[in-house]
Amino acid sequence: MSPASSRPVPAHVLDAAIAWQLTLDSSSPLEREEFAKWHAAHEEHARAWRQLGMLDQRFSVAKGPARNALLQSREGIRRRVRKLGSGLASVVVIVGLGLFASERWLPLDYWLADQRTATGEQRTLHLADGTVLNLNTHSAVDVRFDEKRRLIVLQEGEILVETGHGDARPFIVETREGSMRALGTRFLVKREEDGTRLSVLQSAVAAHAQANPDEQILREGQQVLLRSDGLGSIVALNLGADAWTRGMLVVDNARLSDLVHELGRYRRGHLGVAPDVADLRITGSFPLHDTDKALSALLPTLPVQIERHTPYWVTVAKADSKPE
Amino acid sequence: MYRDHRGWLLAWLRRNVACPQRAEDLSQDTFVRLLGRDEMLTPREPRAFLVAIAKGLLFDYFRRAALEQAYLTELMLIPEGEQPSIEEQQLILEDLKAIDRLLGQLSTKARAAFLYNRLDGLGHAEIAEKLGVSVPRVRQYLAQGIRQCYIALYGEPT
């Protein structure tokens, strides 16, 4: 582009050119004729028109994924930034990105979090107070330490917390559903579809729901589901609840659909199970870092087969049903 | 100003971003932006002033990170064979960020209207319905969008 052709036009010419561009989106032949006259009337008119055309080319790159990325509302980001400095950064913004239908859609809180893991990734964080934080697959946390407290906000996924000793500030994990105060301890917090699951592996944790400040103490070997309106009943820990920290998934007499759902958290794309085998029961341990291998491990023990339509669309189906 | 408030600003940023390195960078950028101003004024409330600048930078940072993450997430939804190479992805991301900068000052609705029109080729009436505004308002949004892109690329009209 030569300097002359990129020189800005006078404001009234630009306004006219913009008005023409908007008109021509739905124009009559008569208008087109008028436009042609306008266009030919002055060098600046033609230049403005050319410049607007060049501008359009800028947007041609935005197709498919790029287009979708660009079109997302920025409201959530604005809201988050507005909140900065209010001291209430732990309040979780529930962002309306659910309207992007896909279950693989990552809510804004996930990608705005301080620390996050991708699907299939696990990571260990060593915090300043000596606390060790294990992030499971597709998880996101904010770390908010100040003079008064050590706060972890779990936005997505699952963490194992081993609190550091010798720090007087309370150690708190918050989720959308509630708050958990560590009493010198090792515990798991997992965001599930219907709430936050707290599993205490060592010592004790005081928990309360978001809408109810009454704390309940959970002891070693206990778990509970927190919903924002209250705590569920306290039951015994699932076997191997923390096996993921060693790269394994351990299930005991689990429904096949639950196992498959769990494995699906560690791989991209769709992992489904056919309804006619969903209720089969299975016991065993499965490697999380190779979910294909984990799926193959089902074959000797269950009457199922793995249907791989693409690497991104895999279904566990009944063995005798022929794949298409 | 730097001497008096640097520590305080850093603490503020740390509270909000938690990653110490990122807070450090943002704190530096805030003061650099301050130095870039023509008149070296001493504002009456220096901390509020610093926070205003830091918020602007944080906003940019979040926006870029969000856009990038959104794009990568979108890529996950398409089959591996159809995904652009890493180099192509980087180029597309650069373009996306450039577009995002072009549209920086638009309101959320104006931005959406503009993108529906340019990327999806939607007509004015369709956009009006989608956004729940009148057709003349959509034309206003589109004019704003075109004007802003024009100014970003060619400069203020004379």
Image (tube, rainbow, N blue to C red):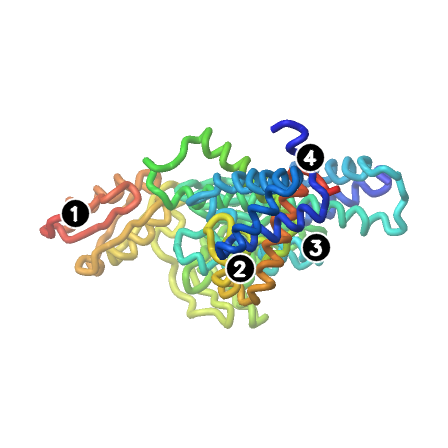
Image coordinates for residue B126, horizontal then vertical, percent: 47, 62
What is the spatial separation of the Cα atoms under label 2 and label 1, in whole angstroms?
A: 39 Å
- Label 2, residues with CA under 10 Å away: few <14, some 14-19, many ≥20: some
| Amino acid tagged 3 | Lys
* Residue highlighted by disc 4: A7
Q: Residue at x 34, y 37 (%)?
A: B82
| Amino acid tagged 1 | Gln
* Residue highlighted by disc 1: A305
Circle 4/circle 3 CB separation < 8 Å: no
Image coordinates for residue B125, horizontal then vertical, percent: 50, 63
Image coordinates for residue A147, horizontal then vertical, percent: 72, 51
* Residue highlighted by disc 2: A95
Residue A148 is marked as: 3
Q: Are marks 2 and 1 on the same chain?
A: yes
Image coordinates for residue A264, horizontal then vertical, percent: 33, 49
| Amino acid tagged 2 | Val
Q: Are marks 2 and 4 on the same chain?
A: yes
Quadrant placement of the N terminus of chain A: top right
